[in-house]
Image: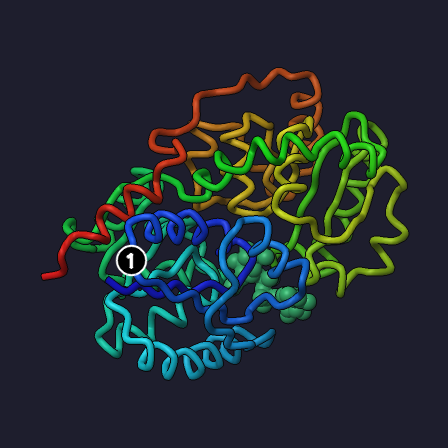
């Protein structure tokens, strides 16, 4: 059979990698399409190398733009590619604009779409990713969910049971595979960044970083905490472009650096005393690693990281942030078993299902 993968933004790469590898082992024909939503070397190229996946067969080079512009550009550039390549199934990942754009194209052409990481819901439609999830899951033919809350959300939206497959978390497949390599590079990284004990910060959501009235108090709160424990802050281009001067002036405990590669970031997550983030994937990775995670959002589409993991929602409550931070430093939040099916084998389950004959 022939499978076409659509990737575009940083979090897609670690989800597609294990599925690609697993389908290759079975001997299926595959095509990798990179939309170019993320294009900086540090946001894209370094991941293909680190994750040991072949370079894209097709690059659409769409670049940045408003949501409408970016989604439309992906759609119009992807349509001729998918028509020329004639795959049996198109695989889309996560909740980024590339995911929804490719799904819309395939749905109209009658090409089978499989959504990996389906069913997650924050129930917050002000998040662009929530719109992408809702549309993608309504249109996809096969929905691979990472946890049972995904199945429940899809059932509530009227998605037929036969389309839903609870397979586990592909991002954790990648983590399990690469953790030994991350461990190997940690000593050198620690020395390079002159780190002893430290916390790790990432922030890139528009709702947190686009508006100074929100971002600047957040930066102040982080600067304050960084006096107790150095905080390493690899900055997403969205955040650094907007706040270059403010980031430079932030307290010296806040170690502002460029985006890191996959292995480097994984190594830092594994050894951090605490992670402060607004990313979705990092809530999952810290849950698996047992690292306390303080999420600077009011809601999460990954509630299992709270019920079964190490995640705590902070919103913009700085007192709660201080409390969570101190609790993490005191080690008072015990490590739990990872959620069911977060076992490094989700991609194998997906490939087995995709290899069944199409009716
Ligand atoms: C996108 C995803 C988000 C995901 C995040 C991971 C959507 C709606 N959002 O957000 O779900 O968590 O990726 O990083 O798909 N930029 C660069 N170089 C790049 C990429 C982006 O400089 O390689 C800058 C551009 O100024 C761009 C901005 O970052 O306008 C935002 O990029 P965009 O792809 O629109 O969304 P992200 O914020 O990265």
Relative horizontal placement of residue 245, taking residue 321 as reference (left or right): right
| Residue nearer the viewer, 6 or 137 | 6
| Residue nearer the viewer, 173 or 249 | 173
Q: Quadrant of ligand 1?
A: bottom right
Quarter of the image for residue 317 reads top right
Query: Looking at the image, can residue 110 be seen?
Result: yes
Provide the secondary structure element on which disc 1 rests: loop
**Residue positioned 43% across, 65% down in the render:** 32
Query: Looking at the image, can residue 135 be seen?
Result: no
Relative horizontal placement of residue 348, taking residue 334 as reference (left or right): left
**Residue positioned 60% across, 42% down in the render:** 315
Q: Quadrant of the C terminus?
A: bottom left
Image x and y of residue 200, in percent: 70, 37
Q: What residue did someone put label 1 on?
A: 28
Image x and y of residue 50, in percent: 59, 49
Quarter of the image for residue 136 reads bottom left
190 is higher (above) or lower (below) than 164: above
Image x and y of residue 241, in percent: 76, 65
């Amino acid at each position: 059979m022939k499978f076409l993968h659509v990737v575009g933004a940083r979090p897609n790469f670690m989800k597609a990698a294990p599925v690609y590898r697993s389908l290759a082992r079975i001997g299926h024909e595959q095509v990798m399409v990179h939309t170019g939503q993320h294009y900086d070397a540090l946001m894209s190229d370094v991941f293909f190398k680190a994750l040991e996946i072949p370079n894209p067969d097709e690059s659409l080079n769409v670049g940045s733009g408003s949501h409408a512009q970016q989604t439309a550009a992906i759609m119009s550039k992807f349509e001729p590619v998918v028509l020329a390549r004639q795959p049996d199934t198109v695989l889309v990942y996560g909740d980024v604009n590339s995911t929804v754009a490719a799904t819309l194209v395939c749905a109209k052409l009658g090409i089978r779409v499989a959504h990996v990481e389906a069913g997650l819901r924050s129930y917050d439609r002000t998040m662009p990713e929530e719109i992408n999830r809702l549309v993608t899951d309504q249109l996809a033919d096969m929905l691979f969910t990472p946890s049972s809350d995904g199945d429940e959300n899809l059932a509530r939206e009227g998605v037929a049971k036969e389309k839903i497959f609870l397979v586990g978390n592909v991002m954790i497949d990648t983590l399990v595979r690469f953790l030994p390599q991350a461990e190997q590079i940690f000593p050198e990284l620690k020395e390079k960044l002159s780190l002893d004990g430290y916390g790790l910060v990432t922030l890139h959501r528009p709702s947190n970083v686009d508006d100074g009235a929100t971002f600047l108090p957040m930066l102040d709160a982080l600067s304050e905490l960084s006096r107790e424990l150095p905080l390493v802050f690899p900055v997403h281009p969205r955040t650094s472009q907007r706040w270059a001067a403010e980031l430079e002036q932030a307290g010296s405990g806040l170690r502002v650096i460029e985006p890191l590669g996959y292995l480097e970031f994984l190594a830092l997550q594994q050894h951090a005393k605490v992670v402060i983030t607004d990313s979705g994937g990092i809530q999952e990775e810290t849950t698996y690693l047992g690292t306390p995670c303080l999420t600077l959002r009011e809601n999460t589409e990954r509630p299992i990281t709270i019920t079964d993991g190490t995640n705590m929602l902070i919103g913009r409550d700085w007192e709660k942030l201080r409390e969570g931070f101190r609790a993490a430093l005191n080690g008072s939040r015990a490590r739990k078993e990872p959620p069911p099916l977060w076992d490094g084998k989700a991609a194998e389950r997906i490939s087995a299902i995709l290899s069944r004959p199409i009716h």
